[in-house]
Image: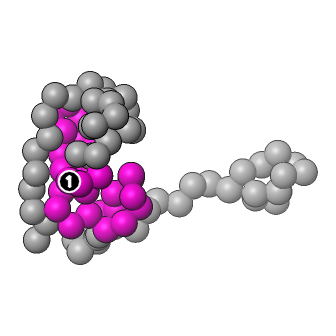
C-alpha cells in the first residue's frame, strides 16, 4: 500500500504538530509573529492587535470562526 499515492486513493496519516513552550504564535491575518496580541472575547483566536483593529473597521466578525465581537482586548506578548 502506497501512502499518499493519488492513484490508489490512499492518504498519508496526519502528523501531530510539534509544540514547545517557546512556540511562536502567528497572526492568521498578516501571517507574521504576533507581538501585541489582540483577542476578541467571543472566541479563543489571537491576532496582532493592529490587524484585528483594522479588520474590525470592515466587519465585526472573527476572520476565522465568524462569531460577532464588540470589543478587542489588547495584551502584550512577553
Q: Quadrant of the N terminus?
A: bottom right
Q: Which residues are magenta?
A: 25-51
* Secondary element at tag 1: helix
Above/below status of 71 relative to 35: above
Q: Is residue 68 left or right of residue 11?
A: left
| Figure colour scheme | one colour
- Across and down, in percent, residue 28 comes to 39, 52
Above/below status of 13 relative to 35: above
Identify the residue at horizontal 33%, vertical 30% (top origin): 59
Extreme right residue here? 7
Q: Is residue 62 visible?
A: no
The residue at which mark 1 appears reads as 49
Extreme top residue here? 68
Identify the residue at horizontal 36%, vertical 29% (top origin): 66
- Across and down, in percent, residue 45 comes to 27, 44
Specify few, some or many for label 1: CA neighbours under 10 Å numbering under 14, 14-19, or 20 or more: many
Asked if residue 34 lies in the magenta stretch, the reply is yes
Asked if residue 43 lies in the magenta stretch, the reply is yes
Residue 69 placement: quadrant? top left
- Across and down, in percent, residue 24 comes to 29, 69
Q: Is residue 67 left or right of residue 41?
A: right
Identify the residue at horizontal 14%, vertical 40% (top origin): 72
Q: Between 54 and 45, which is closer to the camera in this rendering? A: 54
Total numbered circles: 1
Q: Between 66 and 2, which is closer to the camera in this rendering? A: 66
Above/below status of 40 relative to 35: above
Q: Is residue 60 visible?
A: yes
Q: Quadrant of the C terminus?
A: bottom left
Extreme bottom residue here? 22
Residue 22 placement: quadrant? bottom left
Magenta span dominant secondary structure: loop
Identify the residue at horizontal 39%, vertical 52% (top origin): 29
Amino acid at each position: 500500500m502506497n501512502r499518499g499515492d493519488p492513484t490508489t486513493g490512499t492518504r498519508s496519516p496526519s502528523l501531530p504538530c510539534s509544540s514547545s513552550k517557546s512556540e511562536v504564535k502567528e497572526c492568521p491575518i498578516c501571517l507574521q509573529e504576533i507581538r501585541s496580541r489582540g483577542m476578541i472575547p467571543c472566541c479563543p483566536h489571537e491576532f496582532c492587535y493592529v490587524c484585528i483593529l483594522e479588520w474590525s473597521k470592515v466587519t465585526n466578525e472573527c476572520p476565522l470562526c465568524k462569531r460577532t465581537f464588540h470589543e478587542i482586548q489588547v495584551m502584550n506578548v512577553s
